[in-house]
Amino acid sequence: MVIAEFPTTVEAAKRSHELGLKVLMGAPNVVRGGSHSGNVAAHELASHGVLDILSSDYYPMSLLEGIYKLSWDERNTLTLPQAVQLVTKNPAQALSLDDRGVIAEGKRADLVLAKQVDGHPLVARVWRQGKKVF
């Protein structure tokens, strides 16, 4: 096992890190401002430096919005590039997918261009393996 999915407390997330696990939370948790079941909020784990991966969970567009919300949130120190790594580099590394997750020579070149419209991030273009698909 390499991922601790949806730990319910800060203590569980910290212990997962101590054991070498990457902590994964759902991006809808970020978008909503907390867990719908009353568990720890993803932004709180980010403020403790123990949030490693965001998943789309049940709402795919939450990934993009979650990245921006975390980078704008003054309760943690994540920059936009660090927040982006929660959905790119970190999950790829956790799953040993060495051909993706970063922009570098010899990698897959899966890219998303986002833009803000009325304060909301939207997907403007998508490239898969270097070929424009949207």
Image: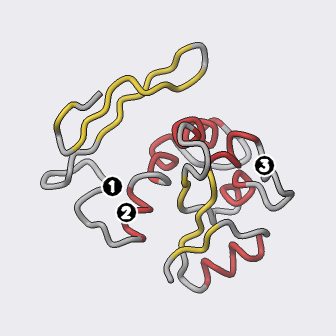
Residue furthest to the bottom: 19
User: N-terminal of the two: label 3 or label 1?
Assistant: 3
**Between disc 1 and disc 2, whose residue precedes?**
2
The answer for how far apart the CA atoms under marks 3 and 1 are is: 26 Å
Q: Amino acid at mark 2?
A: Ala
Counting residues from the start of the chain, the first of labels 3 and 2 encountered is 3
Question: Contact (CB < 8 A) between labels 1 and 2?
Answer: yes
- Residue at the spot of label 1: 101
Residue shown at the point (22%, 61%) measured from the top left: 99
Which x, y percent locates residue 125? 32, 26
Q: Write down the quadrant of residue 18 in the picture.
A: bottom right
* Mark 2 secondary-structure assignment: helix
Check the image and report above or below for 75 versus 19: above
Q: Which residue is mark 3?
A: 34
Q: Is residue 101 left or right of residue 77?
A: left
Mark seen at residue 92: 2
Residue depicted at x 54% and y 74%:
3
Q: Nearer the viewer, residue 114 or 74?
A: 114
